[in-house]
Amino acid sequence: MIGIKLKEIREINGMNKKEFAQYLGVKYTTYNGYETEAREPSSDFLILVSEKFDVSIDYLLGLKDEREILHSYQLRADEFNHIKKYRFIEEHSPEGAKTVTYILNREHTLAERIYELEKETNKNSYDSAFHNENAGQPTRTLNYYQRLASAGTGQIVFDDVPVDLIEIPDTPEYARVKYAIGVNGDSMEPLYYDGDILLVEPMQDVRVNDIGIFIVDGE
């Protein structure tokens, strides 16, 4: 049972056995023994997996079906009371629980739209401030590839990508910038947001802590 759970967690996180073992800091042969159930994992290993992937040890042992750990200490008192009320409704009034879920999803969707509007407003304010700050400075023109830098699961790169032109300040800070590229996705937030424009400097080597854009197997 433990081996099945380990394989499930590993595959959900998109790792092969070697990558998973390296991430956990154990030898490949040791981890492989755990997943194939050829050897029994230690309690320290189970605690490590539990902490790294936020799963309960009871789940790893097959004692419970619920995967995630409910961190009650992260809930406010009113949030905890909401959960208790929902569970009571769910048990005694299934139709009422459906109504609560519908309203929650509707309001969550509305809140997401408001958040996106606020984010776009803040971005526009930043862009305006950027242009005002650099007004009167010499500029140069760059090719701009819209939404091509995937901050997420990756995307196919085609040969005929649409190209726009943008202007940037012609300053020493941007002297080695060769093109601009748009962010597609939100996995880099809050450093980069979906739709942000990145100025790219091609390099032969990547230094520690550098953030790079890479093409691997056409993606």
Image: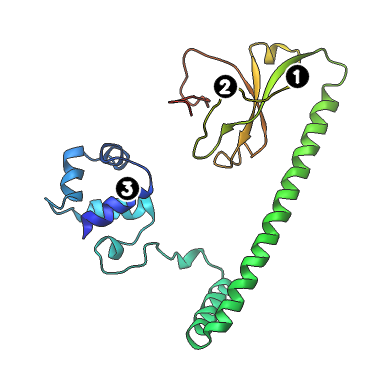
Q: Earlier in the sequence, mark 1 or mark 2?
A: 2
Q: Residue 56 in the image: x percent, y percent?
A: 33, 62
Query: Which numbered disc covers residue 159?
Result: 2
In the image: residue 25, left or right of residue 180: left
Three-letter residue code for mark 2: Asp
Q: Residue at the far left: name it.
A: 38
Residue in the foreground of this view, choosing between 205 and 14? 14
Three-letter residue code for mark 3: Arg
Q: Residue at x 80, y 38 (%)?
A: 125
Quarter of the picture holding the N terminus:
bottom left
Q: Residue at x 71, y 17 (%)?
A: 142
Q: Residue 113 in the image: x percent, y percent?
A: 71, 55
Q: Residue 80 in the image: x percent, y percent?
A: 53, 74
Q: Residue 153 in the image: x percent, y percent?
A: 49, 39
Q: Secondary structure at mark 1?
A: strand
* Residue at numbered disc 3: 10
Q: Secondary structure at mark 3?
A: helix
Q: Earlier in the sequence, mark 2 or mark 3?
A: 3
* Residue at numbered disc 1: 168
Q: Residue at x 69, y 18 (%)?
A: 143
